[in-house]
Amino acid sequence: MGDRWQVEVDRALCIGSAQCLHHAPGSFRLDAGRQSHPVEPETDANEKVLAAAEGCPVEAIMITLLGSGEPVFPPEG
């Protein structure tokens, strides 16, 4: 069984660029205030969600391993 991730968006940082929608269509949505939200906060590890986090211009997307809380993105250090 593969890793499971907890995906969160810091709405205080989110600028509504929609880069997450571009990188991972179907995994994020923008609300009426153009703030990003993960469609599934708990998801299987996948490259598109990671690309969305890496492509966010303000690093508003945090990914941790479900259960342990170990950071996936942004990496520690």
Image: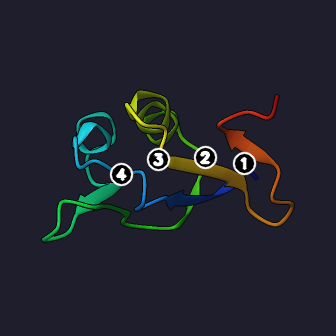
Question: Where residue 16 sits: x, y (%)?
Answer: 23, 49
| Residue occupied by mark 1 | 2
Distance from Cα at disc 3 to Cα at disc 2: 18 Å
Sequence-wise first label, 4 or 3: 4
Instruction: Locate the C terminus and report the quarter of the image it occupies.
Output: top right
Sequence-wise first label, 4 or 1: 1
Question: Where residue 5 sits: x, y (%)?
Answer: 65, 56
Q: Is mark 3 on a helix, strand or loop?
A: loop
| Residue occupied by mark 4 | 14
Q: Which amino acid does label 4 sit on?
A: Cys
Q: What residue type is labelled 1?
A: Gly
Q: Which amino acid does label 3 sit on?
A: Ala
In the rendered view, tell whether residue 31 sits above or below residue 27.
below
The answer to whether marks 1 and 2 mark residues whose Cβ atoms lie closer than 8 Å is yes
Instruction: Give the quarter of the image for residue 75.
Output: top right
Q: Is 26 displayed left or right of 76 in the figure?
A: left
Distance from Cα at disc 4 to Cα at disc 2: 22 Å
**What residue appears at the point 27 percent right and 61 percent down from the top-left corner?**
35
- The label nearer to you, 1 versus 2, is 2
On residue 60, which mark appears? 3
Distance from Cα at disc 4 to Cα at disc 1: 29 Å
Sequence-wise first label, 4 or 2: 4
Question: Where residue 74 sits: x, y (%)?
Answer: 65, 36
On residue 45, which mark appears? 2
Q: Which of 8 and 40 is in front in this view?
A: 8
Q: What element carries label 2?
A: loop
